[in-house]
């Protein structure tokens, strides 16, 4: 039986003015273990697997909690396998839900894509954002080489 394992390592960063925190509270490494024909055929989905806790405040204006968004990108142009194989990034899809407007499932690319926009806090505190993942759902893995594949993701908290 062929087995395929895709691992995502997640990094976070912030890019804005004021005070901001993007902390991963759970789900910092995602493993997709393809060990059956059914999984190859239909893919694997993990709903609300990664949880971010977001704090965002503009310190230049009193009591200002402006809109922000969460972007993601892969740090490589493809998913690299330990045995020298590669996969296209578009076998992975991500979706963020929480405080703002979700863009729905988006294909992974190596340029920033916005997962959640128009998010804002109304008072000091934190907001929780959940990220869901799909691998091999829209673009099948049938016929791909078995390997241990890894891709690093960078999530960025941006002001709007």
Image: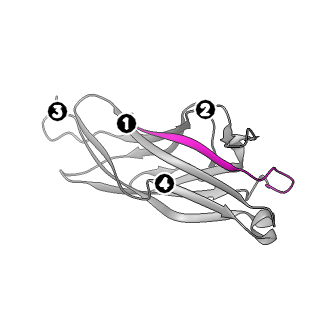
Identify the secondary structure beneath mark 4: strand
Query: How many angstroms separate mark 1 from mark 2 (CA)?
Result: 17 Å
Q: Is residue 9 left or right of residue 120?
A: right
Residue that numbered label 3 is attached to: 59
Residue ID at (58%, 30%): 111
Query: How many angstroms separate mark 3 from mark 1 (CA)?
Result: 19 Å
The answer to which image quadrant residue 135 occupies is bottom right
Q: Give the number of the mark in front: 1 or 2.
A: 2
Ranked by sequence position, the earlier of labels 1 and 4 is 1
Out of 92 and 107, give the one closest to the viewer: 92
| Residue 38 percent location from the top left of the image | 79, 71
Residue that numbered label 2 is attached to: 76
Q: Is residue 158 magenta?
A: yes
Q: Give the number of the mark in front: 1 or 4.
A: 4
Q: Which mark is residue 29?
A: 4
Q: Give the number of the mark in front: 2 or 3.
A: 2
Identify the secondary structure beneath mark 1: strand
Q: Kindly check if marks 3 and 1 are in contact, taking CB atoms under 8 A apart as contact.
A: no
The answer to which image quadrant residue 88 occupies is top right
Check the image and name the residue furthest to the front.
83
In this picture, is 59 found above or below 98?
Answer: above
Ranked by sequence position, the earlier of labels 2 and 3 is 3
In which quadrant of the rendered image does the N terminus lie? bottom right
| Residue 133 percent location from the top left of the image | 58, 57
Q: Which mark is residue 13?
A: 1
In this picture, is 30 found above or below 86?
Answer: below
Q: Is residue 62 left or right of residue 131?
A: left
Query: How many angstroms separate mark 1 from mark 4 (CA)?
Result: 16 Å
Extent of the magenta region: 141-160
């Amino acid at each position: 039986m062929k087995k395929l394992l895709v691992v995502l390592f997640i990094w976070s960063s912030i890019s804005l003015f004021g005070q901001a925190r993007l902390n991963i509270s759970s789900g910092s490494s995602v493993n997709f273990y393809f060990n059956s024909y059914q999984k190859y055929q239909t893919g694997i989905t993990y709903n609300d697997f990664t949880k971010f806790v977001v704090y965002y405040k503009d310190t230049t204006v009193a009591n200002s909690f402006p809109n922000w968004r969460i972007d993601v990108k892969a740090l490589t142009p493809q998913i690299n396998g330990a045995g020298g194989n590669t996969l296209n990034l578009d076998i992975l899809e991500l979706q963020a839900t929480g405080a703002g407007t979700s863009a729905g499932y988006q294909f992974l690319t190596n340029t920033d894509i916005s997962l959640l926009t128009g998010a804002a806090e109304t008072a000091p505190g934190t907001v929780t954002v959940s990220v869901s993942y799909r691998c091999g759902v829209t673009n099948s893995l049938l016929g791909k080489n078995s390997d241990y594949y890894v891709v690093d993701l960078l999530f960025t908290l941006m002001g709007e």
